[in-house]
Image: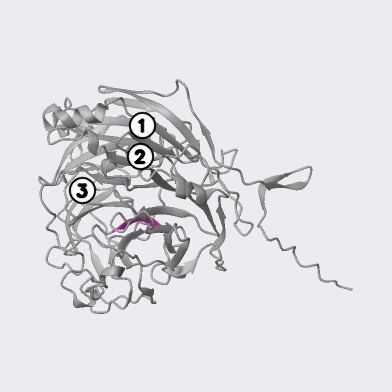
Amino acid sequence: MFVLPPPPPRYTIPVAYAAGAANGMAVPVVETNNTISHPESGCPLQVGEGTYILKDDLLLATPPPHPSEAPIVNPNPLATVPNPPTSGVKLSLVTLDPRKKPPQFLKGPVLAPQFGDGNPALAPPTAPPAKDALKRRKPKNNIIKSSSSFVSRVITHETSAKRLSDRDPNGVFAFANINRAFQWLDITSASKEDHLTKVLFTKSHMLCHDINELTKTASHLDIVMGSSAGDIIWYEPMSQKYARINKNGVINNSPVTHIKWLPGSENLFMASHANGALVVYDKEKEDALFTPENTGITEESSQLPLDILKSVNSRNQKTNPVSFWKLAGQKISSFSFSPDQRHLAVVLEDGSLRLMDYLKEEVLDIFRSYYGGLICVCWSPDGKYIVTGGQDDLVTIWSFPERRIVARCQGHNSWVSSVAFDPWRCDQKTYRFGSVGDDCRLLLWDFSVGMLHRPRAHHQNSARHRSSLVPPAAPPAPRHRADSGANRMRSDSEKTENFYGDIEPVASHPIEPRSRTALLPPIMSKIVGEDPICWLGFQNDSIMTSSLEGHIRTWDRPSDSVLNHDRRR
């Protein structure tokens, strides 16, 4: 007689198990706490203005996989261990101390209008009464008491309420993603390794996040997070409220690769997706099944590849999305808003840097990497230069006013994963920026037009134009810390394939040969860990990095280095 097996046990707290077994039995994975170390003499950064001292190394706990998650399989047949169970730790930092804000380089007020200005359907409602002017709207759902299957559980530290009431009002909060966890940290407290709140998600990893600088107060923070499932979370950590946007991919079911609040906006944020789409959402609007309003290339006169499936000028603005643009058929790696709040720099896995006037929904220019995809991008504080990094192991400087390449920066031995300017070490003549990569290195660069030099001419083969475009049929090469030259692909630089598979006559810039491109060496290069570095940030008193496996390192600046630099300005 056939007997049905008993139902599986039900646990109040999910229990995950490690791959493999001991003595034939599954081994439970115990969730660990963050740990911190204070190296006494390790990893100093020697630069012209002095020595940056490694203050501490905070290691975030990697949460165990949820029982419903598929086991991790490493596609490398020579690998002996699974891939690191994380998408790479990124940080979002926020402080209420005006002394810690980056110096401003743009003179006078920013004259750029708001995104969607002139569309009555996006006009803000009538101003609230004065007594409600300082109140910010919060999401509706309590994340601690949530019954959603998307949220696994929320762990609030037992002393978090007391720490929040006693904290330094001029301190710095950090929000960090690691695997399926999202942590809220007070990195200026004595117990910075103890999270204030840790949110664990199910079947989804948070890949990117951002804090709204316009709406922040001592009692309110607006955070948006983009996930590997395409879902977006609007989170208010003070009240532990949240809302879910693009639920189950109703607007776009592709992973969110980068997310940023629109400059000067309380409600609007932009998200890039792995299918080549740029979407603007409103945190307070409901979602609706997205149906493209426009089809085909709308910029017929300029032939530039931007498919506007929904324009910001559309009168249908009752539901998300606010706008929906298709840039390519391949992954958008990252994007960055210009300081003048008008332009957008977008880098893609096809190796292109695309410059846009996002207020007018226009592509202005297209540049290409030497070869391989581009991964990261940032603007100089004055908006004159754009820096990119990618799979060609190079950091590249582009001039925005002159629309040309300025220099290629050689120093990395593998893919460049993050670039950032140090506004406290920039002035109108000299710029300081940094880069990190899969070679576990942190590099610092000083740049001015007068110091650049051109290399000696190489042999004729190296002077050929090269392109970074990867045919859509070819899968992207896997990222790893070693040099990946064997996996890189090249194609004819005189042609561009759009996401329809056609060859379009885009007036984009050809690849500048190495023999005619200025080279810039780093002023400092240092291996700072044993796993790839994936994020870099500059504070007024420190440099911070985060790594693939969860190491957050902080270097204190040399004494008075920023103050002395400010006096020279």
As drawn, the label of residue 536 is 2
Which picture quadrant has residue 395? top left
Residue at the spot x=22%, y=53% of the render?
354
Which picture quadrant has residue 561? top left
Residue behind mark 3: 367
Q: Nearer the viewer, mark 3 or mark 2?
A: 2
Question: How is the model colour-coded?
Answer: one colour
Please tell me whether mark 1 sits on a helix, a strand or a loop. Answer: strand
Residue behind mark 1: 442
User: Could you say where residue 165 lies in the image, as x and y percent from the top left?
Assistant: 46, 49
**Quick check: 493 above or below 324?**
above
Q: CA distance from mark 3 to mark 2?
A: 24 Å
Q: Amino acid at mark 3?
A: Phe
Range shown magenta: 255-261
Look at the numbered discs 1 and 2 and tell me whether their residues touch, using CB distance below 8 Å. Answer: yes
Instruction: From the viewer's perspective, tell me whether residue 459 is left or right of residue 57.
Output: left
Please tell me whether mark 3 sits on a helix, a strand or a loop. Answer: strand
Query: Residue 4 lies in magenta, yes or no?
Result: no
Who comes first in sequence, dot 3 or dot 1? 3
